[in-house]
Image (cartoon, helix red, strand yellow):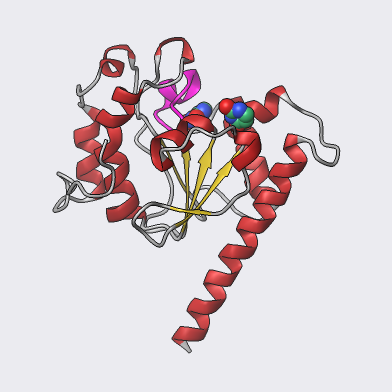
Amino acid sequence: MDLFLKQSDFSDLSCDKVKEICQSCTKCQLSQGRTKVVFGHGSIPCDLMLIGEAPGADEDLQGLPFVGRAGKLLTQILESVGINRPYDIYIANTVKCRPPENRAPLAQEQEACWPYLQAQIFQFVKPKIILLAGAPAVKAVLKIEEPMTKIRGEWKKLPGTDIDVMPIFHPAYLLRNPRKDKGSPKWLTWQDMQEVKNALNFIHKVRELNAS
Ligand code: URA
Ligand code: URA
């Protein structure tokens, strides 16, 4: 999958139009089992974007990303540092349709879905910071397969771009690991989110200074 060189097929289209095309997409087998396509949700453009793995059961029914239990935890985590959905963040997934039994999306499914994510990143959202929630998002976007425990909280660049990227634990993983003591996954995620909030504040400050 050549992520960064391929010209998007959608370069002349509006976000609504691309969403409409995505809603009748049959480029991979996931289309056969879906109720609704979960294209993505949030402000456009937006300094902050989060990319998750794939829609689950609740998302598939509602057509919106991160609205189930993991999504509610994600909303709380974001709000704890003053990031409010849908205004301050655009949220999407590596694949737009729910995999059967919530299995991880296959590389070929992520590849088939990449042009939509590519259009979201480069054409519509144009984020300064991208959060990658969980290993499948890291693998699809950064092409690395290191353990999340090793790479979470580390700033990376989206290859070939100046966009800052941070891998974070997936909220579903935090649901399975509810401890909050120092060094626990939740505690580490809180550190990561404060760092992200500081980076956003810095971006806004620089923009203000440049405008004045
Ligand atoms: N998990 C994800 O990775 N994405 C969603 O949209 C919901 C749950
Ligand atoms: N392992 C994963 O696959 N994802 C996480 O978010 C944390 C650990």
Magenta residues?
53-64
Q: Is 193 left or right of 166, judged from the image as shown?
A: right
Q: Give left or right: position of 136 versus 31.
A: right
Task: Classify 50 as above or below 22.
Answer: below
Looking at the image, which is closer to me, 144 or 176? 144
Horizontal and vertical percent position of residue 56: 48, 21
Q: Nearer the viewer, residue 137 or 88?
A: 137
Seen in the image, is 133 located left or right of residue 181? left
Picture coordinates of residue 152 (x, y %)? 62, 42
- The N terminus appears in which quarter of the rendering? top left
Is 89 above or below relative to 211? above
Q: Residue sitting at 70 percent across and 22 percent down?
A: 176
Residue at figure coordinates x 31%, y 24% from the top left: 109
In the rendered image, is residue 52 in sight?
A: no
Q: Is residue 155 left or right of residue 80?
A: left
Residue drawn at x 33%, y 29% as measured from the top left: 110
Outermost residue on the top side: it is 101
